Amino acid sequence: MHLIQRMKVWKELRQLEQRAREEPSPSTFVDLGQVYINLDMHDKAQRVADDGLALFPRSAELRQLADCARRGTSRQRAADLRARLTRSPNPKTYRELAQLYIDLGDAASLHALCQEWSVRFPEDAGAWMAIGQARLLNFYRDLAAREGQEAVRCLERAVRMDGKDAQSRRLLGEVLYRIGAVRSAQVHLRALQELDPADAEVEALLRHVAGLADQGDDVRALLGGVEEQGCLVHPPPPVAASAPRQEESVARVREGLATVAEIEGVRKATFIKGSRALVKGAIRDGRDPFLRVVRVVAKAAHRFARRLDIGNASKTVVDGDFGHICVCVYGDALAGAQCDRGTDLDLVMAELQEVVAGALHMVAGEGA
Amino acid sequence: MSRIQDTVAELHRLPGVKGAALITNDGMVVAAALDDRFEPEVIAGLASYLLMTTQRCLAEGGLGKATHYVLTATHGKAIVETFDDSSLVVMVDQFVDLGRTEAEVREAAQRIRRASRIA
């Protein structure tokens, strides 16, 4: 790219950045991100996508931009690691690069890398684990028996080479019980438990597997059956029921807001997620200016912090003739309070933080 | 002018302070003393946007004017003291003793007010 072209691109970038600031919309962020991607500046594209998603969390095109930028960043990182491996090969870098290739779905590069890895470090089980992991992904996606056989073969070899490698054992145990080889799976899961007796996840998995019917240990036949039926024999363990249900979350938010409103000096309190708000205190209706102030302060603070690269703005306090406005943010959930001068702001902020933390599992859709 | 610059530079020397800048409401830099990672113009532009957006929203809601602003983010904090047509923006790290630094910022703001009146 010659100088004049470069200047044109920079000018366009400045205009797009200004547009994204002044007229934020998914398309303005996508246009800006696309220019950064074209310039191979994937980290900046990623930041643009993150900024856009903070304002428009449901935008599908911004999610695509974020994904594209993330893949671009991974490719750049992979090229750096590849160059580093050429200079000074070591198993740790091979492992990191293999994981990147798996994430990118680049099977050819992964295969070539693992061949090189196992030739240079024949005692290291990592290459077999990486190939097994990639094959396993293919098997779970397509339910093709051949991929499953290769995955089991590679993972078994990794386990033979390094019996203390927890990841190979876990992957092998999981695939075996999913195809019906429950007893074989239990052997690996028990070995996994011995490696870390405190691992609650493995304990739960063993309990789940104990209740399943064993269909033998002929892996080839079992995989063939899976391919023929088009489905796995046993389901994964049910998701831990620790997440509170939606109603519980809403109740918790209401209780939290009531606690905030009871603090001496607090006049209004709100919890906002998406377009809905729960309110407590002297708020007339949904058009109360306090609600808008909370949203605007949170958005402006978010943009300020992200652009200055100081992370996510989680707490903001604005003082003025009106007293104090406190805003606490977690993800797309906001909690805010308006209080008089002299109010214990530390206590208010701590309670607001509890409100947003308690609402992590709440789905937007409940209003006041 | 040099007294304002001195005040801003003094703030920058406080523990945990990453930089300080006096900016006009329309985003121009009057005086600044910042770590290398912060560009004065960038701080001025972003702080101006933050303050103007908040002030406009407060005014439209009949709530009056914001005079002091504290923003806490994952890797740092910002303290802002507003004047009639300008603002003092102080960037601090996340570990700073906020109460003490806020007191220093308020004191510095008083000195800047006095210096602006004399100028």
Image: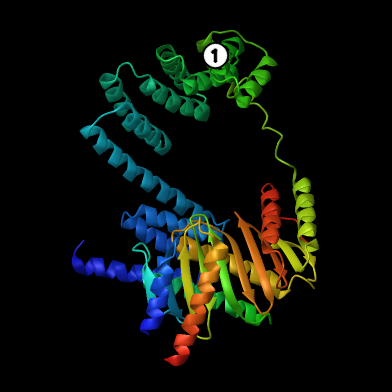
What residue is drawn where x is 70% and y is 51%?
A359
Type of amino acid under label 1 = Ala
As drawn, B38 above or below A203: below
What residue is drawn where x is 80% and y is 62%?
A262
Q: Residue furthest bottom?
A: B118
Q: Quadrant of residue A314?
A: bottom right
Q: Residue furthest left?
A: A2
Q: Which residue is mark 1?
A: A191
Q: How far across and how far down the image is residue A65, in percent? A: 45, 54
What residue is drawn where x is 52% and y is 27%?
A140
- Along the line of sight, which residue is nearer the eye, A333 or B78? B78
**Residue B25 visible, this angle:** no
**Residue B33 visible, this angle:** yes
Q: How far across and how far down the image is residue A326, in percent? A: 65, 66
- Along the line of sight, which residue is nearer the eye, A178 or A43? A43
What residue is drawn where x is 73% and y is 72%?
A340
Q: How far across and how far down the image is residue A165, in percent? A: 46, 20
Q: Give the quadrant of the C terminus of chain A.
A: bottom right
